[in-house]
Image (cartoon, rainbow, N blue to C red):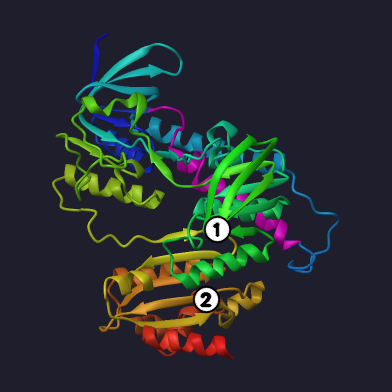
Amino acid sequence: MAVEKYENLVIGTGAGAKLLAWTLAKRGQKTVAVERKYIGGACPNIACLPSKNVVYSAKAVSLVDPVRGLGVTTGQVRADMAGVTRRKAKMVEELVEIHLANFRGSGAELVMGQARFVEMKTVEVALNEGGTRTLSGERVFLGVGTRAAIPNVPGLAEAQPLTHVEALNVERLPEHLIVMGGGYVGLEFAQALRRFGSRVTIIQRGKQLLDREDTDIAQAVAELMRDEGIDVLLDAQTLAVTGRSGKSVEIRVRVGGADKTLSASDILVAAGRTPNTDGNIDLVKTGVELDGRGFIRVNERLQTTAQNVWAVGDCAGSPFFTHVSEDDFRVVLSQIDGGQRTTRDRLIPYCLFTDPELAHVGLSESEAQAKQVSYRLARQPMANVLRMRTLSETRGFAKALIGPDDRILGFTAFGAEASEMMAAVQTAMIGGLPYTVLRDAIFTHPTAAEGLSGLFSGPLTKPEQQTAQSKTAAAT
């Protein structure tokens, strides 16, 4: 079959990849993007946006709870899971249409099918509609993403557990959902399904939830989960699984040296990601090297080991966030345009969209201590932020690390609208501003951002002072 030649061949249509395809095509360059299944990648279809859509539906349930609610009287409240799924599906459909319009408007060709490299910079595409095409590009951009990892636990794969993909499409309410993994995906789904009415148990292999977070943050999130009625098992090893998820399953776990068996209706696996670099894509024929975990080996300019081949997003080992993949696009475009932008020293924020939220940017305390970075700590409870009083959402706290030169090294907030507070702090960090700028700023009252004035007006303490204060508070 004849090879169709393009200036730019893009594999995948996730955030960084689609932006490259649209941008280069708008410049008049002949560009083709190959997508196996999800137009626009995971974020608008099966990840970020759909999951937050479902989380918000669960929030609606909590708002009319007779104990925790807002004084709104209703009849019997129940979750219509089919309705939740329809709402999510409508949003996804609208987002896909926007993506298709962007492909048409940019002039980038979209080919739906499975790409397999047959030689360097050339792929054979098994088209979803049948048949094949062979495409080559002078430049190649890889954005093949990742998928949910299934741990090697006896019987787990055979039980056909839910991943985040299937969990977003469940039109029934699981009677008892066991969540394997205490990271971001697991916690968001655990809280949402609990609020819809499922019994939920979290099994976390590590000694705390969110194993990369500071201990005080992890403890606060675990307390939230337990207050919601979720069973949290820490330092728990899953030994074996029997049965079929969606019907009846039993999971044998070891907790604190003792074995126990949990019975449930469903299992959700949220135990990390695996790069889509194995199997049918056949990257070995491209000269593109992988690292020991299967991610594409790139330098700080996101160039692979093959000439004129770049990788963006999850498959390149970038932090697993859509906003990072979007910045990967900027880095690669800079290389094409002769610029010097790199991935070095990027200030990357992230959020856990439980209710309330966890938002973080910059150094955490544990990171600062590991790197022996000197800092002072500003900290205040969310109850001191008057916006939280108006929402009846006083759970949580905010803290910031301040360097010797008064610049902000890191910020973490666990509380309602924490992501909005973080955005203001991140802006100050990008500008290299001292914390006193936020301390003395005039913020609108009552907003979450107003809480920053109080945070930075309080005493700044050394880490050892914080430890001493915590011990004193515990003793009293």
Label 1: how many Cα within 10 Å (few below 14, some 14–19, many 20+): few
Total residue callouts: 2
Judge from the rendering whether residue 97 lies leftward or rightward of residue 135; answer left or right.
right
Residue 354 % position (x, y): 57, 59
State the residue lying farthest toward the top: 1
**Residue type, label 2:** Phe
The residue labelled by disc 2 is 397
Q: Nearer the viewer, residue 298 or 206?
A: 206
- Bounds of the magenta segment: 35-64
The residue labelled by disc 1 is 257
For label 2, the SS is strand
Looking at the image, residue 280 lies above or below residue 434: above
Q: Residue at x 50, y 65 (%)?
A: 358
Q: From where the camera sits, is residue 441 visible? A: no
Looking at the image, residue 172 lies above or below residue 187: above
- Main SS, magenta region, reads helix
